[in-house]
Amino acid sequence: MSGHLSITGLAAGYRGKSVVEQFTLAPIAPGEVVALLGPNAAGKTTVLRSLAGLHKASGSVKLGKQELMHLPLADHAAYVTYMPQALPDRVGLTVLEAVMSALRASIPAGMGPDDLLVAALDVIERVGITHLAARELGQLSGGQRQLASLAQALVRRPTVLLLDEPISALDLHFQLKVMKLVREVAAQSGMIVIMVLHDLTIAARWSDRIVLLSGGKVEVEGSPAEALTAERLAQVYKVCAAVSEGEHGLQIAIHDVL
Ligand SMILES: Nc1ncnc2c1ncn2[C@@H]1O[C@H](COP(=O)(O)OP(=O)(O)OP(=O)(O)O)[C@@H](O)[C@H]1O
């Protein structure tokens, strides 16, 4: 299935307490990369989990003409993959086994056992962890496990990929490598990506659209230059920042807290 992702009036909370209200975005086109930003506790993870069908929410989430809300979880998971903030459990599976088991959960039609192995090895290579394929997840560092987790998400080739802080444990090299890879996969396959990030400069450089969430509500959505102004950063993050256009996108320097 393809088509735009349309999110309208999404609302969610915990034990009757509202956390996310009236979350509505302009339709997201195939291949578009959206960064969801905002302070701690703004509701970013709640939005992603709601979009993934893992948290009870109201509103409408349509992929093309297909309404995803209230689909049985298995059907929902055929379209949407969620990579959680928490790293994969320290289980005894090797990286290759973990990636293959993620793929087995949603085997595309016509794929045989050899194809599964080729697809898993291909993603592992693209993520840059071929040297870790035979290592057990439990023996990996935090950053290595985060890369394995990303490979598990990418191998499923979802229509919509939701990434919750996918680079939080990575060094500078892998932060950029992952952002480039995600953009490349989105452009090549038409996959829609929504990812929660905290690094504003990386978000500005590698996403098409910024959505800034504050107190559970969309403060602004737009291009990085439209959304990330010094005034808005002061208002939402309570920081004093200087924002300028640079050769590689927006340059954002945080000078102080307010
Ligand atoms: N399981 C839960 N039970 C009750 N309240 C919760 C639960 N999970 C999150 N919350 C509350 O919902 C609000 C939003 O949390 P959420 O995790 O969505 O924020 P976030 O923007 O992803 O934050 P962060 O950047 O710190 O990860 C917070 O006030 C949090 O305390």
Image (cartoon, grey):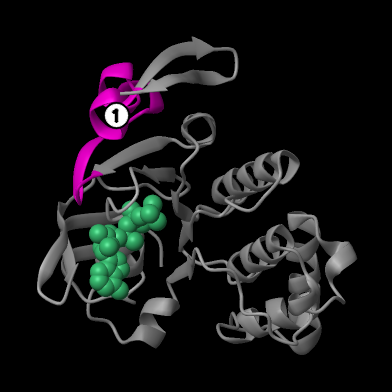
Q: Is residue 54 above or below residue 27?
A: below
| Whole-percent x, y for residue 22 in the image | 12, 53
* Element on which disc 1 rests: loop
In this rendering, position of residue 59 left or right of residue 63: left
Few, some or many C-alpha atoms within 10 Å of disc 1 (few <14, some 14-19, many ≥20)? some
- Left or right relative to 168: residue 159: left
Where in the image, quadrant-wise, is ligand 1 located?
bottom left
Q: In the image, which residues are magenta?
A: 214-239
Q: Is residue 30 above or below residue 96?
A: above
Q: Nearer the viewer, residue 167 or 26?
A: 167
Q: Name the residue: 50% across, 37% down.
A: 199
In the rendered image, which residue does mark 1 sit on? Answer: 238
Determine if the magenta segment contains residue 224: yes
Q: In the depicted view, which residue is nearer to us: 115 or 82?
A: 82
Q: Is mark 1 within 8 Å of ligand 1?
A: no
State which quarter of the image contains the N terminus.
Answer: bottom left
Residue toward you, 197 or 125 = 197
Residue 217 appears in the figure: yes
Residue 139: horizontal and vertical position, in percent?
80, 75
Residue type (three-letter) at the residue carrying disc 1: Lys
Residue depicted at x 60% and y 83%: 107
Q: In the image, 165: left or right of 63?
A: right
Quadrant position of residue 17? bottom left
Residue displayed at 69% across by 85% down: 91
Residue 254 percent location from the top left of the image: 45, 21
Q: Is residue 74 magenta?
A: no
Q: Is residue 50 visible?
A: no
